[in-house]
Image (cartoon, rainbow, N blue to C red):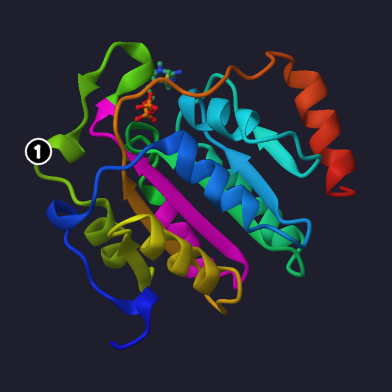
Amino acid sequence: MTSPESKTVARSDARVMNRSELTRRLVARLEANEAVIGGIGNTNFDLWASGQRPENFYMLGSMGLAIPIALGVAIAQPERRVVALEGDGSLLMQLGALGTVATRAPKNLLMVVWDNGIYQITGAQKTLTSSTVDLVAVARGAGIRQSAWAADAEHFDALVTGALTAQEPVFIAVRTDDAKPAGVTERDPAKIRQRFMAGIAA
Ligand SMILES: Cc1ncc(C[n+]2csc(CCOP(=O)(O)OP(=O)(O)O)c2C)c(N)n1
């Protein structure tokens, strides 16, 4: 346990950070046409606000689909790195996806969960991560060995760097605040799908 990305941090010790800022940090590190799937709501609003890329897909309307969609892309295009961004409430609705990812074990999939402990966009009702549920422990339990809390922004960068060359799926959890997203995604599902499919030549 000597490399920065392998340091172990408990959820309670992870710094509470800002989703918009970290989304920008993540997108800034992409350099090889990686596909990025943004989950419903604030997650894809911040992805949109981080700059339009043809390889970005913005999920509208349904919770918990960022990881399943990203898994599908990762399996279909094993040469491409794929990133799923999801909110804690949305991931909690689709926990089985973690076991499916672990079982399929794509070498090219990074999952990032923004854990603010609330369903922010629908009125800040508490999610289970605000009480007992630790999503890194859940991911590890599902079989994803490379699962970690980001201690701070620098540690997040190190985890992302490791994930972009990893040979197994990686799960990064980030505690986030309840600041508003930096923008709002244009609500045009057909256009979003079309642009993404062209962007990844599907
Ligand atoms: C199946 C389903 N149930 C409920 C909703 C309503 N809904 C939309 S976004 C959302 C909260 C999302 O929470 P989270 O993923 O934690 O993201 P945050 O809003 O905190 O950024 C809810 C309850 C929905 N769209 N789909």
Which residue occupies 69% across, 15% down? 186
Queried whether the magenta region covers residue 115, the answer comes back as: yes
Q: Relative to 41, is 1 on the left or the right?
A: left
Which residue occupies 19% across, 40% down? 129
Q: Relative to 155, is 80 on the left or the right?
A: right
Near mark 1 (Cα within 10 A), the count class, few <14, some 14-19 or many ≥20, is few
**Camera-nearest residue between 78 and 179:** 179
13 up-or-down from 191: above or below: below
Indicate the position of residue 62 as horizontal and vertical percent values: 51, 24
Q: Which residue is mark 1?
A: 131
Displayed-image quarter of ligand 1: top left
Indicate the position of residue 176 as horizontal and vertical percent values: 31, 38
Which residue occupies 35% across, 46% down? 95
Whether residue 186 is visible here, answered yes or no, is yes
Indicate the position of residue 26 as horizontal and vertical percent values: 55, 52
Mark 1 residue element: loop
The magenta segment: 97-118
81 up-or-down from 191: above or below: below
Please name the amino acid that badge 1 sits on: Ser
Q: Relative to 98, is 178 on the left or the right?
A: left
Q: Which residue of the protein is positioned furthest toward the bottom in this rendering?
A: 2
Asked if ligand 1 lies within 8 A of label 1, the reply is: no
152 up-or-down from 5: above or below: above
Whether residue 71 is visible here, answered yes or no, is no
Which residue occupies 15% across, 56% down? 13
Name which quarter of the figure residue 139 lies in: bottom left
Queried whether the magenta region covers residue 108, the answer comes back as: yes
Name which quarter of the figure residue 47 lies in: top right
